[in-house]
Image: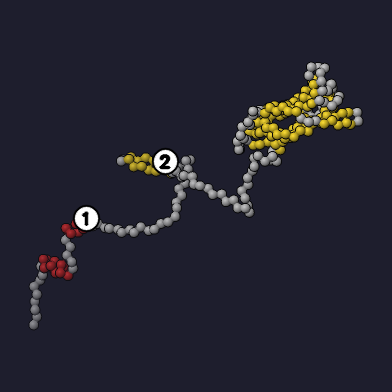
Amino acid sequence: MSTKYPLLGPSRVALLACVAIACVSLEDVAFAQTTSQPVTVTNTPLPVSGSVTVNNPSTSPIPVVVNQGARSSVIRVSVTNPVNSVTVNNPASSPVLTSNTSDPGRMPYQAQQNPTCANQGGTGTTWLCQASFTAVPSGKRLVIQNVAWSAFPSSAPSAVWLDLFGNFVAYLKYIPSAMYSVPGFSVLQIDSNLTVYADAGALNVAIYVYGVTTLGNNQPINLTGYLIECAVGSCAPIVTQ
């Protein structure tokens, strides 16, 4: 015995199709294409340690873009980097090199000049011998420690005076002298230890010899001492009274 089924129409075919699979209308497809769903992204910050150095030289500063509505412009930003303290290690095994600007042996000084001697009054017994030395250099102070000189007078002098004058120095003092005899000559010798200061500028020496009628064959005047550097560590003013 056979059973006959009627033919299915288009609507029944569509119904069976919806039963077999999910039915999606054209309106649903259009809605899915035009709407969006909010999405939340959770980002847990990661721990970061250390320091960052930004080099921003004035010759080539970092450009920064600033948005100004429809316009944008590029400006330069200066990064201020405060000066940090500097620690200098100075171990005893390898100490930092230093210099004592007042050390007498650092800039020793020695100079000599031939004096010009003349009788004061023409026929008197007082003689004046003078010499001009090279100026004390700028930024220096000269400390004179010794003056030495010899000459050949007609007899032993009654007195010898030394006069030093220059920038902030005025020194006039009786100095001891000695007479030595050599075959045919009597030698006057002065060798005076002292401490006299002279700042940068001209330096002159005068020696007065009293009580002799003639004074000849005079030797150079010698100055010895040392220079102090005043440009590095300023020198205190010379007090004169």
Q: On the image, numbered disc 1 is attached to which residue?
A: 35
7 with respect to 144 (left or right): left
Q: Is disc 1 placed on a helix, strand or loop?
A: loop
Q: Position of residue 208 (x, y in %)?
A: 77, 24
**What type is the residue that disc 2 sits on?**
Arg
Q: Residue furthest bottom?
A: 1
Mark 1 Cα within 10 Å, few/some/many (few <14, many 20+)?
Answer: few
Q: Residue furthest front?
A: 158
Q: Position of residue 226 (x, y in %)?
A: 70, 36
Say which of 162 and 79 sits in front.
162
Quarter occupied by residue 101: top right
Residue placed at 81% from the left, 17% from the top?
Answer: 122
Q: On the image, numbered disc 2 is attached to which residue?
A: 76
**What type is the residue that disc 1 sits on?**
Thr
Of mark 1 and mark 2, the one earlier in the sequence is 1
Tell me the distance, in whole angstroms, between the alpha carbons under discs 1 and 2: 44 Å
Q: Position of residue 2 (x, y in %)?
A: 9, 80
* The N terminus - image quarter: bottom left
Residue placed at 91% from the left, 30% from the top?
Answer: 183
